[in-house]
Amino acid sequence: MSTPRSRAFSGIQPTADSLHLGNFLGALVNWVSFQDRFECVYSVVDLHSLTVGPDPAAIRDRTRRTAAQMLAAGIDPARSILFVQSHVPQHAELTWLLNCVTGFGEASRMTQFKDKSSKQGAEGTTVGLFDYPILMAADILLYDAAIVPVGEDQRQHLELSRDLAARLNARYGEGTAIVPEPYIVPATAKIQDLQDPAAKMSKSGRPGGILELMDPPKVLAKRIKAAVTDGETEIRYDPAAKPGVSNLLTIYSALSGRPVEQIVEEYRGKMCGHLKADLADVVVEAFTPVREKTEGYLADPAQLDAILADGAARASQIATRVHARIADRFGLLPRGETGRRGADG
Ligand code: TRP
């Protein structure tokens, strides 16, 4: 007997040509393993990336590249739904409904918005950026997702999604929305910048600070070789005193599946250069198959688009039904056949 599995939802913005090691270990690896335990819905959230105004050619290209890398990393379209957010119009529609139950003050307290908008100034900040967390809540609630794997930096946004879901249930009756649980990625998957090990690995970090999935082996090896460590030769795991070396050990452990202590033991008395050379091999071995598969998907954009169209069709079935249910509770009239079926379901 099989009971229906709970649904997981997560999204990634198409803001880079390549995912980096931080995205790979922090998000993708978890998403892939979630497929064994949940009914997974994963989205390339292109509408979110519009909040920072990338140029149209870049967003088009990066949307495909991001999807291709997800497939290459093991997101399986036969088991999971992989789709592009803008292909399912209910994301934008539910955002409007949620906008109307979100306090202006509540949205103003989102720290990511405060940080970004204070850097850009009020005139340089779009209303879209302000609304970003509400769109994210819509993404999640639209699929009745029970669990949402995200990085620590999304914790506050998840809290808002939970508050909004609970508010809908209080205002419009139980069963209007499912209150999602965050799944915050474990600390072992926290990868720091190679050039500034005090900071999280990120696209906006130091030049040379990231390892990208699509980098050729030579570039990966060069970056690892140039990674900042400290003056003393001893290789030990101590993130406070030796953040650079500890970060290399974390990466080694995460990609090889071996415990950090075992790796430390192996390199006792050896030079940091040894560790770096071997780590470069480990990274190249992990990335190469993903890069090659990604290149395969990108060589056939029609096939890739077909996979995404199929994902959007399956996502739409859920999103149409859930949106209709919520819209009905708000008092909006059903939309003919589709709306009525949804509201009943
Ligand atoms: N804001 C998320 C991030 O930057 C991306 C995202 C958009 C997301 N919608 C989501 C994550 C829904 C989880 C669920 O990482």
Image (tube, rainbow, N blue to C red):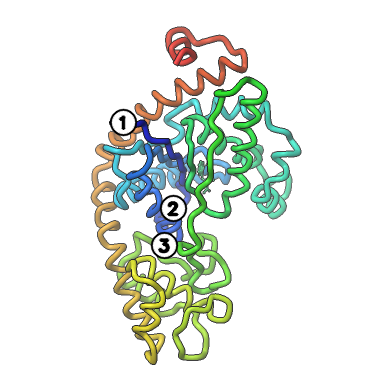
Location of mark 3 (residue)? 21
User: Distance of mark 1 from mark 2, alpha carbons?
Assistant: 23 Å
The amino acid type of the residue labelled 3 equals: Leu
Question: Secondary structure under badge 2?
Answer: helix
Provide the secondary structure element on which disc 1 rests: helix
Q: Earlier in the sequence, mark 1 or mark 3?
A: 3
Q: Is residue 90 left or right of residue 305?
A: right
The one nearer the camera, 251 or 203, is 251
**Residue type pointed to by label 1:** Asp
> Which tag, 1 or 2, sits closer to the chain's start?
2
Q: Residue at x 34, y 83 (%)?
A: 266
**CA distance separating discs 3 and 2:** 10 Å
* SS at badge 3: helix
Within 10 Å of disc 3 (Cα), the crowding (few <14, some 14-19, many 20+) is many
Residue that label 2 marks:
27
- Is there a contact, CB below 8 Å, between mark 1 and mark 2? no
Q: As displayed, is residue 99 above or below residue 255?
A: above
- Quadrant that contains the C terminus: top left
Q: Residue furthest front?
A: 1
Label 1 Cα neighbours within 10 Å, binned few <14 / some 14-19 / many ≥20: some
Measured from the top left, where is residue 99 in percent x and y? 65, 29
Instruction: Mark 3 and mark 2 in contact? Answer it, CB < 8 Å.
Output: no
x, y percentage for residue 162?
60, 37
Q: Which residue is mark 1?
A: 310
Q: Given the image, on which type of amino acid does mark 2 rest?
A: Ala
